[in-house]
Amino acid sequence: MRDKPQSKQSDSAPDLGPQFVMPGDVQAAATSRRVVLVPGAAAPLLALDLPAGVSGQAREQVARRQLQDRIGLTADRAEMRPFATAPRARWQRVMVADAASVAAWRAAAPRARAVLPDYLALPAADGVWVVAGLPHGVAVRFGPADGFGAGAAVALAQISARMATAAPVAILSMGNDVPGLSALAAAQGVPLVTDPRALARIKGAGALRTLGHNELSCDLRRDPQLTRVRLRRQVLPWRWPVAAALVAAGIWAAGDLLQTQRLTAQRAEIAQATQALVRTHFVPSGPILDIRAQVSQAMAARTTAQNDDRDTTAIDLFARASDVIDTTGGTLETVTSADGAALDLQVRVADFAAADALASALAANTLAVDMVEARVTARDGGVRAALRITPGPGAGE
């Protein structure tokens, strides 16, 4: 239950504090030293499965490969930033944003303290979820290490799915009301409050902190590649021979002759099998000189051939589709993208007519829609529609 009845909010932004400039305030963003916020849906926070023993630049390379394999994002179309709640913490989440949008944010806010997605401006604490209804959508913070921004229907579906597996101690609601949030919290027995001071009376609720969990390290204007270049220039030349000598000594001390011979034999077998696969699938003729480079070139050529007529990223498709789904009253259940060029959606609607209306609304928003399947669900008698969405005519103009 709420600590007090929540009054109806206006369409103004919630009071996040004087240090923030809300999306749309172009003049303040260009001249202010405050933190400029952008819609959270344009810079989602994605969880990856990264190996524990890999760190530094190698960890970022593994993360980029996982992003490219999962949703087809490449370095020239999207920028990736690791996110951790402490400066040297082992991170498992990355923030992804369209490269063109990042360039526009840099140009629009040259003097700002930082440019962050709106969900990172919300106060955060362990055990507390913060939900803010904004004029352009909903921002959600699932504690210090996770959050997102989306339309109201998508946000409520995400909150419901997360609550089914790990409910919070309490939910703090800020800004405009999010339809259905109060009923969802009541059904799960989770206290929903509108005054942060009420959290002090709830057992297990942590103390909220704003920008107290390393959020400023995710400044969307900062170029991670440029930071690494400056760091390399600061390293003195004599340190590299010392580092090489230490690595050589460690390798010499770690192995013996028999193990080295065994590893050499295994390496030769793997190299032979790898060359056979490369010859079959990527380089049918000509010499194989650099497997990694030649395979990367072949994959890039295939990707370019598929994407010659596409200027819209998977993030753009998702943002436009979620707005339409929210407007038509559908509930988004799952979203995937195998190649970054198309979205596969599972949407629950009231009936088959609503499914056809949703497809027409998506098509009217310059999206090409393929109704893969529509069937009645046994749970509530509604209809679950499987849609495949690609950029439609005029989408890249």
Image (spheres, rainbow, N blue to C red):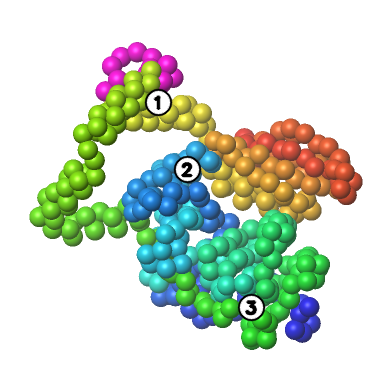
Q: Circle 1 sits on which residue?
A: 298
Residue 309 at x, y percent in the picture: 52, 32
Question: Which quarter shows the N terminus?
Answer: bottom right
Question: Which residue occupies 58% across, 78% down?
Answer: 206
Residue placed farthest to the right in the image?
Answer: 381
Task: Give the number of callouts.
Answer: 3
SS state under label 1: helix
| Mark number displayed over residue 204 | 3
Q: Which amino acid does label 2 sit on?
A: Gln
Q: Give the range drawn in magenta.
A: 277-289
| Overall secondary structure of the magenta section | loop
Q: What residue type is labelled 3?
A: Gly
Q: Which amino acid does label 1 sit on?
A: Ala
Q: Relative to the observer, which residue lies in front, 224 or 355?
A: 224
Q: In this view, does 141 lie above or below 305?
A: below
Magenta stretch holds residue 281: yes
Quadrant of res 327 = bottom right
SS state under label 2: helix
The numbered mark, 1 or 3, whose residue comes first in the sequence reads 3
Q: Circle 2 sits on which residue?
A: 66
Residue 220 at x, y percent in the picture: 43, 60
- The span from disc 1 to disc 3 (Cα, nearest Å) is 54 Å
Which of the two discs, 2 and 3, sits closer to the camera? 3
The answer to whether residue 138 of the structure is visible from this angle is: yes
Residue 207 at x, y percent in the picture: 56, 81
Question: Which quarter shows the C terminus?
Answer: top right
The answer to whether residue 159 of the structure is visible from this angle is: no
- The span from disc 2 to disc 3 (Cα, nearest Å) is 36 Å
